[in-house]
Image (cartoon, helix red, strand yellow):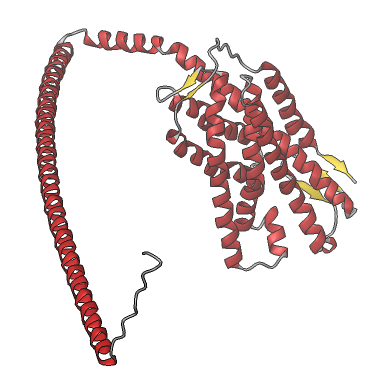
Amino acid sequence: MSPGISHKKRNYSSVYKIYRRLRFIRHRKKQLKQQIKQQLIRETDEKKLAEARLREFRIQEKKQFKIKAKADKRADKERKAALKEEMKQMAIMARLEKEKEVKEAIERRKKQWQLEKLETQRLKEEKRLQRIQVRTKFSWKVYFKNAVIKFKSGKAKRRHNALITINSTVFFIMSYLALFFISQAVTVIAAGFFNYPATVYYFEIYFNISPEAWYHDSVKTIFSAGPLVNFILGVICLIIYHKLKESPVTFKIFFLWGFLHGVNMLFGAMLVGTLFETGVGHVISWMYIMDTGRLLYSILSIFLLVIAGMIATKPFLFSANSYFNEINTGNRQTFMLSQVFWPFLTGNIIMILVRQPRLVFYDTFILFTLVISVLAVLFTFSGYNELYFEEEDKKPGIAWIATGILILALIFFRVILGIGIRLG
């Protein structure tokens, strides 16, 4: 623009200005409408595109789901087919096993039937031979010869059982006499506390006092001291036996019999004394116990004697390690009879004979009440398992030292106590 040229500013009228302003506003509104329209078109297109993409995604997802479902269905079908095949194979195997067991059972039955048939034939043949032997003129010689052979073949076994019985009988009587002497001594000592002079015989203790000298404390102390001490010694004997049970010495059976004698000298004496009002029965009488209480004492005594026998059962079985390397069903019954029953019976017979011509009712009856414990042993030993001991040669013999001590004790019991020992 050259300096010399000057522009003149146009002057518009107010109406025209308003007109131009209105046209500008309308133009701007038109532009805004177009922009809004284009924006709506773009949003619509974008929305349609998004919906199309979403629809395509859902279609793809549905296809993938169908493919996966088909795969799962096919895998499930294959798994079911495999399981069905496995079950079929197991059923076939079970059927084969069952057929095999049935065949084996049939074979066993056939063998058993054949054995029964052979056994029947053998028995028939034996009966036929026996009939022939009976008809034979000199058949009695054959029977006698067989009996002699059988008797000779069992000679070693009988000798062994006799050895067991002798040793057990010796220790049975020894333990009884030991506890008897201790009981008498304790009774005399208890009487000494009350200044009662006494004369001790093998059949009774005579207290050289008048009947009026007895009172509650003296009766309870004197007549209960011996049985209580014997019970305590019996428990100690059981403890000592358990310390010696592994040892093969035969002397340990002394302590086992001592346990049974100790229990029996309390509860057996309580049973006899309650029934016949003698010995320990004096204590119960002076306690003024009625008949119902006496009955309860008797039942309790029997129960505890049975318990003592059950406690001694296994120790008696274990004492076989002095004579055998094992105790089983073949030798268990014979051993228990030789170790328990025959010594009990023989020992009682010997004590009855030693006490002749007097039959001491109280002491003899107490010895016989031990049969309750013995029967408990004999009825329960078969319930125990087999026992195995050390593998070494067993060469037991008669306990000569114990036998000598027993003879001296019997002489003292019968001769010295027959004369009587005065104390106090």
Residue at x 77%, y 42% (from the top left corner): 184
Classify residue 186 by image quadrant: top right
Q: Residue furthest bottom?
A: 15
Residue at x 71%, y 65% (from the top left corner): 287
In the depicted structure, whether residue 295 falls above or below residue 342: below
Q: Position of residue 35 (x, y in %)?
A: 21, 71
Taking 184 as reference, is 53 left or right? left
Q: Is residue 364 visible?
A: yes
In the depicted structure, whether residue 423 falls above or below residue 15: above
In the depicted structure, whether residue 348 falls above or below residue 106: below
Residue at x 66%, y 26% (from the top left corner): 244
Residue at x 16%, y 9% (from the top left corner): 136
Q: Position of residue 80 (x, y in %)?
A: 11, 40
In this view of the protein, which residue sits in the foreground, 77 or 283? 77
Q: Position of residue 348 (x, y in %)?
A: 59, 35
Q: Position of residue 248 (x, y in %)?
A: 61, 19
In the rendered view of the protein, which quadrant contains the N terminus?
Answer: bottom left
Taking 269 as reference, is 186 left or right? right
In this view of the protein, which residue sits in the foreground, 356 or 222? 222
